[in-house]
Amino acid sequence: MSIQVPIEGLVHSNDTFEVDDSSVNRRGIAHVLISSTYISGRIKELAKRIVADAAAGGVSQLDFVIVLKGAAMFGNVLAQAVWAAGGPPIRFNYVKAASYGMDMTSSGEVAVQSDFLTEGVGSEMILLIEDIIDSGLTIFRLKDRLTEKVDPEAIKICTLLDKPSRRQEELKDVEPDYTGFIIPDIFVAGFGLDCAECLRELPFVAALREEEFHSDA
Ligand code: IMP
Ligand code: MG
């Protein structure tokens, strides 16, 4: 089941971190789009599904391939939730890939910096973990690279956020296996996602003020 986030957001009144308006309305943040309580609840649900699927497939070893930098926070919290849900042991791999430069338009080029293909990831169940899927280029190019070595059936794509309305035409039919939230076509930051390398530390996902969308204008 997917969770569709409206433009005004999902904010929980009992949030993990109390954030008042003055602290939110700093550094280009327009409003909280998905509060930390929603995020941690959803990560637990995803973890339970992953653990159930791993058990059904007789998987004894999970391999996380976490896409840096944006998915570092999500991947690490997800790993803890998988442990708490009784999942199999996890091996961590990190891959640096970027299709966005310092601005907010996809360059179309996906640079991959990692030895993950030669270091060898396992072959039972590999979770390719992203912060957000936008055009789809980064994650599906990475998956292609991985299928040079591993059975594609074993590779699952897991993303915290998805903007399906932005998907490239030829990638329209490809869906992630595990999605945290489907968001509208707006630029967001927080929980690992950046805006020109800032705001990754926010415990929530924020919608940015309009002028931040056009910072390169
Ligand atoms: P894609 O290759 O077009 O799917 O782009 C995915 C990458 O673009 C993600 O890993 C993010 O780094 C970045 N990205 C896309 N949308 C956003 C956003 O709203 N906020 C921050 N980063 C984004
Ligand atoms: Mg990224």
Image: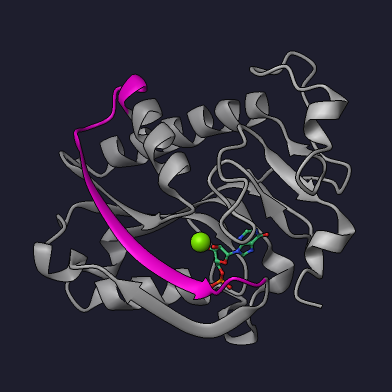
91 or 30, which is in the foreground?
Answer: 30
* Camera sees residue 4: no
Query: Residue 188 vs residue 127: left or right?
Result: right
The C terminus, quarter of image? bottom right
Write the residue at 29% across / 69% down: 152
* Camera sees residue 113: yes
The N terminus, quarter of image? top right
Is 102 part of what is drawn in magenta? yes
Write the residue at 46% across / 50% down: 71
Q: Quadrant of residue 156?
A: bottom left
Q: Position of residue 127 (x, y in %)?
A: 34, 52
Write the residue at 61% across / 32% down: 203
166 or 113, which is in the foreground?
Answer: 113
In magenta, the rendered stretch is 83-103
Is 108 part of what is drawn in magenta? no
Q: Position of residue 53 (x, y in %)?
A: 35, 41
Write the residue at 68% across / 65% down: 164
Q: Position of residue 7 (x, y in %)?
A: 86, 49
Q: Residue furthest left?
A: 119
Q: Quadrant of residue 91?
A: top left
Q: Position of residue 174 (x, y in %)?
A: 53, 71
